Image (spheres, rainbow, N blue to C red):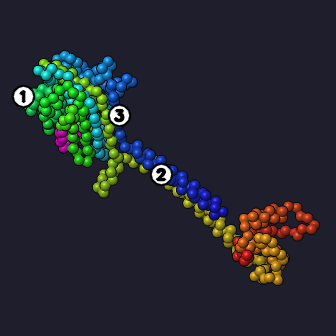
Amino acid sequence: MAAAVSFSYQTGVHNLFMLLCCSSSIWSLATSSISFTSNFSHPDYDARDLSFQGDAYYEAHSRMIQLTPSIGNSVGRAFLATPVPLWDAVTGELARFTTSFTFQIKANKANTGDGLAFFLGHYPPASIPRSEREMGGGNLGLFDKSVGTVATGDDRVVADEFDTYLNDGFDASGSHMGIDINSIVSRAYTNAIVPGRDLTSGLPMTCNITYGNDTKILAALLQIGDTTYRVNTTIDLRQFLPNLVAIGFSGATGVAVELHQIVSWSFESTLDPPRESPGSRPPTPKTLLPVEIITGPVIGVIAIVCIFVGVRRWQLFARKKRYKALARGLATNEFAEENKLGQGGFACVYKGQLVSTSRPAAIKRFKQTSSGKGRKAFEDELKMASRPRHRNRPCRIDRLVLRLPEEPG
């Protein structure tokens, strides 16, 4: 019986363990992650995961995203068709992200402009009005040029710009990388002016942008050939952007004409579940969902296991008590040698007496050296004793199996 209880207990523990494993999987669903890699030059690439505004389009022949065609006063945007979680509106938890993209700017060196940018902004981005496309230029397609240099409302944007036109009054050079926060005037910038390694050199350029939700540092690293440019700033994105954002690229031309081409793009973002802290706010039903899913089944499994084990222990206790009562009703004179009736390979038989009725009884006592085969033979004897009586076989009044001290081997 102990083995049966052990098996049921182990089964319950196994089920409990599996349930807890499942709960870990359920909890992992609370983490919002987005990851993709788009190689636009791949023959099987499908541009349906992107949305386009203005003059931007996917050019199947060159297998690139063209933000602006070879015309002046052009504005175009290409962005991910689905919004990206930037921070949790309930807990305030920020996402961390990394993005990498390769792009080219094909320009007339005598007259370049205006540039392109990677941006995070309102989803979906405001449409590009015809007036903006006719005006082109200055704001790199990030927001309507008619509002000036500062964005508000749904025009709010955080961007890493690659500016190829010198605007008097707020640009440091005609080739610079800068971080813009709700303004076309960069908060931080670096000039990319190494000869042959500037933004309009015609070389493929790769930019890696990272944001740490713990450090609040937004950093960009631009590689042009063997030259590296870096820029970074500290920013809490929750103060400037909504919790769901659009991510993508924008570009613009003005009087000058140049091509802004995106060759490949990868993006990875993770929004962690809320961390517990002593002063944290009470969890909302949304954050409690995984716990609610787990608690009921876990309590149920534990209760079933405890009840089952308790019932088994009670049965064993009751049976043991009954055995002791019956054992007290047997008299064998402490298994005296003169009461031994016979001996086999695995047990000895003693003459005894039922105290309550004074009727004779035969008591079989196993030897310490008896094997499993001996116990099996004893069970066979019990089966034989249960069959109809024979005139040459002693009458069986009842049978009792006790775990008494065994006969020395």
For the point 87% across and 69% down, the residue is 395
Q: Which range is magenta?
A: 230-238
Q: Is residue 106 left or right of residue 358?
A: left
Picture coordinates of residue 219, whole percent (x, y)? 21, 40
Picture coordinates of residue 146, whole percent (x, y)? 14, 24
| Residue 20 - label | 2
For the point 15% across and 20% down, the residue is 108
| Residue 168 - label | 1
Dot 1 crowding, Cα within 10 Å, few <14, some 14–19, many 20+: few
Vertical arrangement, residue 25 with respect to residue 179, above or below: below
Q: Which residue is mark 3?
A: 36
Judged from the image, the secondary structure of the residue bearing numbered disc 3 is strand
State yes or no: residue 75 in magenta.
no
First in sequence: mark 3 or mark 2?
A: 2
Q: Is residue 389 left or right of residue 332?
A: right
Q: Amino acid at mark 1?
A: Asp
Tell me how far mark 3 sits from mark 1, CA to CA. 39 Å
Q: Amino acid at mark 3?
A: Phe
Dot 2 crowding, Cα within 10 Å, few <14, some 14–19, many 20+: some
